[in-house]
Image: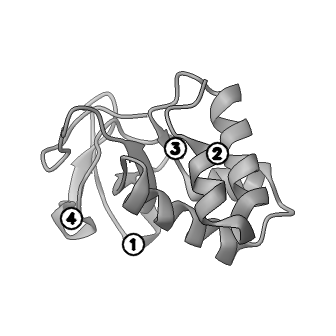
Amino acid sequence: MSRINFDKIREKNPRLAETYNRIENWLDSHPAASYVEPRRLSHDFPELNISELSEALYVLTIDSGVKLAFKVKQPNGAFLPYVFDDASDIPDSLPDRLHEHFFEVGPDDIFPIFYFVHDDESHSRMAEGG
């Protein structure tokens, strides 16, 4: 069961109903997910219009307890466990997941995510996610 009332969202945004159907299906098939990565949704549903997907996710930040944040991929392609409220909060270098090496963080390493807010939590500090 999804954390978001998609019936209400589809009613308010009928033009994006099919996009919300896909997001809801993805969430239902990934019940442990604490965030949604637009790039992954785009990969899983290549038929979705990327502009509509972006708009649909943005609307969720207004109406549904979803918040835009950022994650960093390390050189091996895996996400680090940190979530940043603002891309400008991301340091120029970060340790890899095993804290064995630091790597330089470039713009291509930063990815937007949409995470689910519970009880007014904030991720303004580095926090586990995904």
Residue 125: image location, x then y, percent: 12, 45
Counting residues from the N terminus, which is met first, the one under dot 4 or under dot 3?
Answer: 3
Nearer-N-terminus badge (4/2): 2
Q: Nearer the viewer, residue 107 or 118?
A: 118
Amino acid under disc 2: Asp
> Are there few (<14), some (14-19), or many (20+) residues within 10 Å of tag 1?
few
Real-space Cα separation, disc 3 to disc 2, in angstroms: 39 Å
Q: CA distance from mark 4 to mark 3?
A: 17 Å
The CA span between labels 4 and 1 is: 10 Å
Residue 2's x, y, as percent?
Answer: 57, 31
Q: CA distance from mark 4 to mark 2?
A: 42 Å
Which circle marks residue 82 in the picture?
A: none
Lateral position of residue 60 relative to residue 28, left or right: left
Quadrant where the C terminus is found in the figure: top left
Q: Nearer the viewer, mark 3 or mark 1?
A: 1
Q: Who's the residue at 34% across and 33% down the image?
A: 97
- Residue at 68%, 72% in the rendered image: 52
Residue 7's label in the rendered image is 2
- Residue 118 relative to residue 54: left or right: left
Give residue 76's mark.
Answer: 3
The answer to whether residue 74 of the structure is visible from this angle is: no
Report which quarter residue 80 is drawn in.
top left
Residue at horizontal 44 percent and vertical 33 percent from the top: 34
